[in-house]
Image (spheres, rainbow, N blue to C red):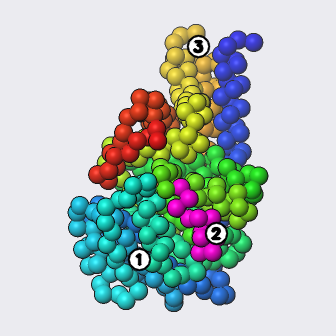
């Protein structure tokens, strides 16, 4: 058996596994738009941490303030912004009595920005259910009712939602990897248990959690220095026996988290390592393996264009089959999210770019580099 044959067995097997797993998730992963409102509507608190979000906060507040839901409040925490985030949030509220903007001060020692902002929001919230939403999330008018329905129908204590992403071509190709990862990689069909707490995925863009469960788990105060506070909260809830679920919310929730590719790069350099349990070897092995699976067939097609190789199984037909097989999960996730069909064609490049971001994250960790985010500097090795 030649080395090339072994490569095809490994790559083809991995891509087949991802495709089968994506089909399983496609059949079982709940969709927010298909979940109706529960019989009893709990009081909800929408909590929005915002630091230097003047460009995005207005659309978010407008969307949450106009929900078709009878009993809820919207709290925006201006986390010591240096721009006019607070003023724009107040203007977007339009005098609505159920919307309040809270002014925060300097970040205290022993905390990172987002966990602190969410902690302060919880102190002012009065709802039975806490809905932590990033400042760039724009909900459909019936999103809150269906979020309540998700908690009830899934019998969950905490549910997080994956939105659709807007932006330029490069940004969308990369941010849509989140939708792909949920469908292709994450075993969303497998319920989390205390023994499988590592499967308890919470996406910090939008989390709905019952207030009693949040408080019992210590909330974000239990991970004040985490750069992946959403993952830490999900794993802690699961470890304590609470049910944590993930829902596809792309048809009712949209966001534009990054205006520029550089912002996206810095965010991934900051977040990737904590998501992979703070393990550089695990992060590098996972991302480089994925890049190999998606890029190796393309490289073989290029090398196989030479006379004597073109049209053979090892250099042409198997690589073509692997390219097509590798796009199956991305086509499924893109269609669920409402992305254009052309975006999937950029998937191999996006996976390769993500691998480079992972290498950047690990190098910053090893050399003790800091990273600037929202005018604050974070030590990735801390």
SS of the residue under disc 2: helix
**Which of the 4 image quadrants contains residue 42?**
bottom right
Q: Tell me, for residue 242, which label it has, or none.
A: none
Q: Residues within 10 Å of mark 1 (few under 14, many from 20)?
A: many
Query: Do residues under tags 3 and 2 come within 8 Å of each other at their CB atoms?
Result: no
Residue drawn 33% across and 68% down? 104
Residue closer to the observer: 350 or 118: 118
Q: Is residue 294 visible?
A: no
Classify 240 as above or below 330: below
Residue drawn 64% across and 45% down? 185
Classify 282 as above or below 253: above
First in sequence: mark 1 or mark 2?
Answer: 1
SS of the residue under disc 3: loop
Residue 60 % position (x, y): 38, 71
**Which of the 4 image quadrants contains residue 162?**
bottom right
Q: Residue furthest front?
A: 109
Q: How many marks?
A: 3
How far apart in space, not on screen, are marks 1 and 2 (Cα)? 22 Å
How far apart in space, not on screen, are marks 1 and 3 (Cα)? 63 Å
Q: Residues within 10 Å of mark 2 (few under 14, many from 20)?
A: few
Q: Is residue 222 magenta?
A: yes
Residue drawn 63% across and 38% down? 325
Q: Which residue is mark 3?
A: 309
Q: Nearer the viewer, mark 3 or mark 2?
A: 2
Q: Tell me, for residue 216, which label it has, or none.
A: 2
Q: Which residues are magenta?
A: 210-223
């Amino acid at each position: 058996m030649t080395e090339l044959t072994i490569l095809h067995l490994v790559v083809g097997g991995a891509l087949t596994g991802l495709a089968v797993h994506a089909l399983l998730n496609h059949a079982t992963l709940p969709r927010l738009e298909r979940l109706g409102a529960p019989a009893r509507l709990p009081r909800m608190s929408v909590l929005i941490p915002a630091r230097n979000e003047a460009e995005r906060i207005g659309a978010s507040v407008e969307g949450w303030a106009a929900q078709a839901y009878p009993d809820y409040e919207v709290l925006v925490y201006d986390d010591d912004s240096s721009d006019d985030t607070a003023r724009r949030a107040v203007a977007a509220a339009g005098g609505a009595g159920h919307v309040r903007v809270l002014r925060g001060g300097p970040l205290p020692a022993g905390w990172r920005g987002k966990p602190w902002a969410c902690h302060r929001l919880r102190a002012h919230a009065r709802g039975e259910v806490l809905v932590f939403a990033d400042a760039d999330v724009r909900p459909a008018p019936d999103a809150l009712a269906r979020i309540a329905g998700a908690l009830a129908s899934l019998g969950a204590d905490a549910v997080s939602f994956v939105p659709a992403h807007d932006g330029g071509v490069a940004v969308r190709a990369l941010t849509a990897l989140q939708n792909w990862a949920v469908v292709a990689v994450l075993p969303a069909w497998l319920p989390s248990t205390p023994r499988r707490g590592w499967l308890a995925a919470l996406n910090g863009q939008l989390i709905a959690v019952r207030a009693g469960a949040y408080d019992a788990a210590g909330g974000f105060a239990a991970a004040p220095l985490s750069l992946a506070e959403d993952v830490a909260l999900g794993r802690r809830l699961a470890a304590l026996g609470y049910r944590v679920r993930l829902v596809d919310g792309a048809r009712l929730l949209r966001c534009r988290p990054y205006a520029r590719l550089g912002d996206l790069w810095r965010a991934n350099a900051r977040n990737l390592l904590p998501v992979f349990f703070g393990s550089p070897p695990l992060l590098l092995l996972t991302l480089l393996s994925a890049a190999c699976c998606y890029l190796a067939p393309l490289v073989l097609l290029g090398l196989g264009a030479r006379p004597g190789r073109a049209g053979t199984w090892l250099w042409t037909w198997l690589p073509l089959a692997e390219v097509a097989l590798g796009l199956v999960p991305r086509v499924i996730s893109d269609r669920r999210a409402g992305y254009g069909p052309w975006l999937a064609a950029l998937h191999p490049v996006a996976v390769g770019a993500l691998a480079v971001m992972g290498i950047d994250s690990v190098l910053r960790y090893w050399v003790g580099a800091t990273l600037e985010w929202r005018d604050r500097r974070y030590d990735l090795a801390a």
